[in-house]
Amino acid sequence: MSLFDAIYARQSVDRADSISIESQIELCKKEVTESRFKVYTDKGYSGKNTDRPAFRELMSDIESGKVNRVIVYRLDRISRSVLDFANIIDIFQNHGVGFVSTMEKFDTGTPIGKAMLMIVMIFAQLERETIQQRVIDAYSSRSKKGFYMGGRVPFGFGLKETVIDGVRTKMYEPIESEAETVKLIFTLYSQPQTSLGDVARCLELNGIRKRDGKSFNRSRLRDVIINPVYVKADYRLYDFFRSQGTNIANNPEDFIGTNGAYLYSGDNKKRKTVSLNGHTLVLAPHRGFIDSEIWIKCRSKCLNNQSVAKPIKAKATWLAGKIKCAHCGYALTAKTYRCKTKSGNRYYLCNNKYNSVGCNFGSLDADIVDKIVFDEMKKKLEDFKTLSQQKQEGFDLETIQLKTRISAIDSEISSLLEKITSANETVMHYINSRVSSLDAEKKELYEQITHFENNRKDNVGEISSYMDRWDELTIDDKMTVVDALIERITASKEKIEIKWKI
């Protein structure tokens, strides 16, 4: 079988500054030494990988022993990856195939030619990676400044023109009718016994649909709930994302409860839907419209949906969705077994019991567990009442931040008053105006502190009243009370541990 020279030409994009397929072939023909040759062309394919139709055909002919030499216009027509190129050269040599580049004038028939060839490819790879890094750095820089980075506009927003740092860009602007739907979604899902399916059914029954006229499904609702563009980004949101291991581009003092936020994917291979660790949070230029407290509650519920979702039709226990196996972390389910007694006996069983590698949890008497938790809830409320005065004197974050601002105001007023002795009429006018403004803000902050303190008292008193008439409540109402007090319960035969919210 007679061998032939193979001419390979590739062009990823048809541009004025790129050499055409036809020109590449004409230049390569000057290097042909065999009596016949075959041309392989890939147009519209990148050189970052070798998954190209004509290139696959060329490699097949090489492995069949049909090719004498491969001729290309330039090295990167074969591949821009050093690793891929090295592997290709090895295949060429294993089949006795030479390689010629018309521009670089390399002949792989000699050791020095092969060495020089690899050096050139290393620099080509370095150039490509440098360009990629510049693109990544530019994207990161623009995103951290709050520039609109493209993509689908979230439900609830439209786009409007704006200028940030002298650069024309776009920003989100709430659409009132859609924003009201988003608020309803968060309100519904924030209820402990409500699932995404329940929210979808409620919206459908009330004729509320997406902007394309289609119904909301669970996946679309989840996209809304996990997106921080809607939240009023304050210190609660900052603390939440920091606790999740998220990289936060802005300073803590920038989280003043007005702007929404963007969440960009980071180095973490886990998706943002299941983990926030390693991703990046950036304050956005638009205003948010969902309170951080309700957003965090919904996001936490959705983030750990498998472990915290509470079945709306729970009948056997008001701890549904809260109580977990201390051994494997799976949910405990209350089962009722009717034997000789009419009422039956209730037991907690691990949901992991029947899996291929099951859990050895066994069972717990549900009545005993429920009584222990109920007693601990009552005790916690009593302890909370005892400590409430101490908390009101500065141990809760809300009050601390308000009092810190009051202290800063007092310092600024003192500094202004010190300048009175040397102030002229213009400066005195500024000092009087500024002191009046600061004094008004100070009074408003004290009113907020009083409001927080009264709310804490009211909330504790309301929950305590529920506890006093516990047997009269429905399971759904009991679950709501539990959700207000308890983050999670882990249980085993040895002990029961409760993680509190208060």
Image (spheres, rainbow, N blue to C red):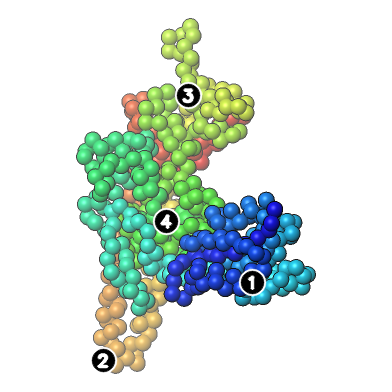
**Neighbourhood count class around disc 4 (C-alpha, 10 Å): few under 14, some 14–19, many 20 upward:** some
Of labels 4 and 2, earlier in sequence is 4
Image: 243 above or below 322: below
Tag in front: 1 or 4: 1
Q: Secondary structure at mark 4?
A: helix
Q: Secondary structure at mark 3?
A: strand
Q: Which mark is residue 296?
A: none
x and y percentages locating residue 470 in the rendered image: 37, 28
Tag in front: 1 or 2: 1
Task: Name the residue: 58% across, 66% down.
Answer: 77
Q: Where the C terminus falls, by quadrant?
A: top left
**Neighbourhood count class around disc 3 (C-alpha, 10 Å): few under 14, some 14–19, many 20 upward:** many
* Residue type of the residue flagged with mark 1: Glu
Residue 468 visible? The answer is no
Tags 1 and 2 touching, CB below 8 Å = no
Image: 301 above or below 473: below
Q: Secondary structure at mark 2?
A: helix
How far separated are the C-alphas under marks 4 and 2? Answer: 44 Å
Task: Name the residue: 70% across, 53% down.
Answer: 1
How far separated are the C-alphas under marks 1 and 2? Answer: 90 Å
Q: Which mark is residue 425?
A: 2
Of labels 1 and 2, earlier in sequence is 1
Query: Label 4, on which residue?
Result: 236
Image: 91 above or below 215: below
Query: Label 1, on which residue?
Result: 31
Tags 4 and 3 touching, CB below 8 Å = no
Task: Name the residue: 48% across, 20% down.
Answer: 335
* Residue type of the residue flagged with mark 2: Glu
Query: Label 3, on which residue?
Result: 334
Task: Name the residue: 48% across, 6% down.
Answer: 340
